[in-house]
Image (spheres, helix red, strand yellow):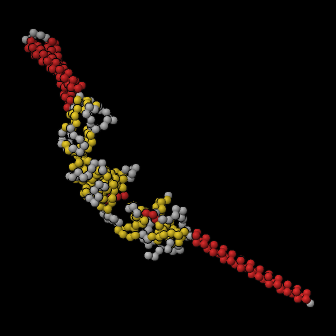
Amino acid sequence: MLDEVQSRTLKRTGLIAAMVAIGVVGVGVTARMNTDRELAATARDNAVQTVKVVKPKHGAGEATLQLPGNVQAFNSAPIFARTNGYVRRWLVDIGDTVGAGQTLAILDAPEIDQQLAQAQADYQTAVANQKLARTTAERWETLLRKDAVSHQEADEKAGDYAAKTAVANAQLANVKRLRAMQGFERLTAPFPGVVTSRSAQIGALVTSGNAASQPLFTVSDVHRMRIYVRVPQSFSAQIHPGMSTKLTVPEYPGRTFNAVLVRTAGAVDPQSGTVLVELQADNGDRALKPGGYAQVTFPLSGAESTLRLPGSAILFRESGPTVVVLDANGRARLQAIKIGRDQGKEVEVVSGLTGSEQVVDTPPDAIENGDQLKVEARARS
């Protein structure tokens, strides 16, 4: 009887233990399943990219076009030596104002001086021979009228006179040439202006006709300046001679200069896709400097309503500029657009958007059509 009671107690204890073990295992499995579900949900959430979205800004496009320009003197002439010699004196320096014909430097050219002296002596000899030949020809012409000489002899004397006259003329031309060369010993300004460079040094040897030589002076006419600008082809139809423009230079912040467009090349450079135009501006106070940089503002007519997006929202792919639009289901849609002007932080969108889209700002480069996206929550201020 006692054995039966003990047997039942053991069976009851074993059953209870088994039930407890099953409960522990069930609780563990349930916890693991919950953990797996949470991990799967977290993985799904992590797989969805969080992005920021912006809406295109509406507004009229700015009726101006800003482009860089290159400022040049109205006239600029590098002054080279036209004769070989040495610099005896230079009379002006950079920044000096000079008038037309004013002497800039004086050269010593002893070879030219000696050649001129020899040429003058040769000319005097030729003139003396010419006079003698003329007297002889006149005498023989008189004798011919008296039949004292033959026509052949008279013609010979007349021919000798003509030959001596030609020699005298050649010698005179040589004298004039050397006098002109001697005149090049004095370098002069071709027009009124300012000296913008000087390389002449006293005693320095200068050689004419050397293409690699440096100009001794540069004279620039700065009373009026030329500004050259390259206009993109897409805006060239709105740029025409006679239009007024504004320009600024870095050394005078806040100051604006007036300029007028005077001519256009009328052809597109195939390498840059631009049209070269020339503007002119008065420069009475010499504020504009040759070789300087300027920012030119062109007024544009017929500016249409445009959309603007941050430059960071644009993807540049092989097919062209593209934006990522977020649809109603939170999925990505790649939309090709056409860009007008790049204004730095923002770009003008000419076509491809209506203005009501949600555009992803700074989209990932690897994003594709249909990717699930999540909009980043904005922090409350």
Residue found 88% across the figure and 88% down from its top: 5
Image coordinates of residue 158 in percent, x first then y, are: 15, 17
Q: Quick check: 160 above or below 229?
A: above
Q: Residue furthest top?
A: 148
Query: Is residue 269 in sight in this rendering?
Result: yes
Q: Residue 241 versus residue 196: which sits nearer the camera?
A: 196
Query: Where does the C terminus fall, quadrant-wise?
Result: bottom left
Q: Residue furthest front?
A: 2
Residue found 44% across the figure and 72% down from its top: 356
Task: Tell whether 107 sits left or right of 35.
Answer: left
Residue found 18% across the figure and 20% down from its top: 122
Image coordinates of residue 336 in percent, x first then y, are: 47, 64
Q: Quick check: 200 above or below 165?
A: below
Residue found 29% across the figure and 54% down from its top: 251
Query: Where does the N terminus fall, quadrant-wise?
Result: bottom right
Image coordinates of residue 263 in percent, x first then y, are: 27, 52
Based on the displayed image, in which of its 4 quarters is residue 253 positioned?
A: bottom left
Number of marks in picture: 0
Based on the displayed image, in which of its 4 quarters is residue 13 positioned?
A: bottom right
Q: Residue 323 versus residue 301: which sits nearer the camera?
A: 323
Task: Tell whether 302 sits left or right of 329.
Answer: left
Q: Quick check: 297 above or below 122?
A: below
Image coordinates of residue 98 in percent, x first then y, are: 19, 43
Task: Tell whether 322 sits left or right of 29.
Answer: left
Q: Residue 78 versus residue 338: which sits nearer the camera?
A: 78
Query: Is residue 158 in sight in this rendering?
Result: no
